[in-house]
Image (cartoon, grey):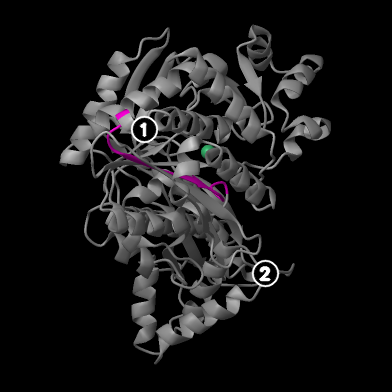
Amino acid sequence: MNADIARRVEEIALDLASTLSVVDTPGEVEIAEKVYRIFSEMSYYKANPQNLFYVDVPNDPLKRKSVIAILEGKKAKSDKTVLMIGHTDSVGISDYGNLKEYAHQPLKLTEKFRELDLPQAVKADLESGEYLFGRGLFDMKSGDAVIMAIMEMISEDIDHFEGNLVFAAVCDEEGNSAGMLTCVGEFGRIREERGYDYLALLDADYITEEYEGDPNKYIYIGTVGKVMPTFYVVGKETHVGESFKGLDPNQIAAAITSRINLNPEFSDVADGEVTLPPITLKQRDLKTEYSVQIAKSAVVFFNYATHCSTPEVILRKMIRAAEECFEEVTDTLNNRYRTFCEMAHREFKPLPWVPRVMSFDQLCAAVRKEVTGLDEKIKEKARALMQEEMDSRDRSTRIVAFVHEMWSDKNPVVIVYFSQPYYPHVYVEGKRPKEKALLEAVETAVQDTKSDYQLGFKKFFPYISDLSYGAVPEEEGVVETFQENMPGYGITYDLPFEAIRALNLPVLDIGAFGKDAHKFTERIEKKYTFNVAPELLYRTIKNLLK
Ligand SMILES: [Zn+2]
């Protein structure tokens, strides 16, 4: 790509980085206004102001907003359109310690780093002169800059460009994706209004080494998804003086963690690409005070990455795993009790525990038989919990406890449900015409881009991102299973499934290359980011619109 574009990408990236836009702060509004201003200074938007506008996040205390910029080629009328997104927020800056004031000044910060005692790998990159440091520069303001510089370049020669581009610079990606989730509906509206045919959803979020020393730079087609299977474990309380009379939910929760945590048996494999296995994000009992009574219930949840398994498949796997764990705990306890009885010269009688595991949906079905108006009661409870300050995952747990308490059956049980958030995976198999066209467009772009790097393309962008909201898996029951097993869905959490399904696009990521996203050593490699990524992005767009 020509040197002017590389310079322009760098200029915009530094400009964007100079405005701190930490998620959930007023900086998010400032950065949206800066993006708007950069576009509005292009002569195309001076002539076509209707193609540049804000999309407000509804009911947002900070009044955050996203920016949409549309380019319509004038060479010939075409409905072909590439949809692009980039987030403009970043994570916080407390990790910079006393260098905080330089976090948004990449050039100064990079100089300041020379005075620090840094890990060897960071030091080597710093001394090479090929890297630039700064909060948000890598994740993902340089990616935004790539899209914006390419749009600017195209806009300057719009008479010779065929097809359309729609770019949304979205807020809150590092939080709850409020920007993307409001833009999804807007994308539908734009399509209806202008008769566009969207071909793909392109993001420019960061790419990095997949392992140390990985020489490859990839374009990713499709994206990983994420669900959070959660286990609500009800044991049987007892006084510690009669410990074998109780069933400790902590023991079952521990068995579940031990069974599932980082176990590749639960990795999701598609096209030979493997997700990282699940990992716990929380495990604790729900006892609030100290006493000599054991806990009554415990909760454990996992971050579960997906390539192709639907919520229903995950739910079934998790129920099966919990059944095994429950059986194992029961067996262990019986063995230990037998040994104890022998040692204490007592008569052994098997413990009464019967392993059982059910989904939240099944729990509701059981309680519905006993309680009239259960669903209305759940809604009321969910609305009441929304008035209380707490983590939203705790709201779901409280709803499960609320429903379980209404049940006449007080025997131990494990209830499996989903906590928020849900990020659907997007698997681009290459069966549908749009998928095939995208795979070809990327393959050709990679072939035609000359560089010193080992370029390639791969399935599944490996980091959770807004790309997930470009499509909902096509299997039947995906939405229903999630909704029915996410306590409080519709009140404590909501996804615009219909609008996402209406898009139903193959997705891809062409990102800036760098290292250490979300760490204070976050940095971009300049040559790839400013020279190669723009060319890959431009060629892919051109190939798609051909
Ligand atoms: Zn990002």
Q: Which mark is residue 293?
A: none
Closer to us: 510 or 164:
164
Specify whether residue 95 is in view. yes
Q: Nearer the viewer, residue 302 or 125?
A: 125
Q: Amino acid at mark 2?
A: Glu
| Residue name at image x 50 percent, y 13 percent | 3
Whether the magenta-drawn stretch holds residue 164 is answered as: yes
Please provide percent x and percent y for residue 65: 56, 55
User: What residue span does the magenta drawing correspond to?
Assistant: 160-174
Specify few, some or many for label 1: CA neighbours under 10 Å numbering under 14, 14-19, or 20 or more. some
Label 2: which secondary element: loop
Q: Amino acid at mark 1?
A: Ile
Residue for badge 1: 158
Query: Which residue is labeled 2 in the image?
Result: 389
Image x and y of residue 415, in percent: 43, 67
154 within the magenta span: no
Q: Nearer the viewer, residue 112 or 426?
A: 112
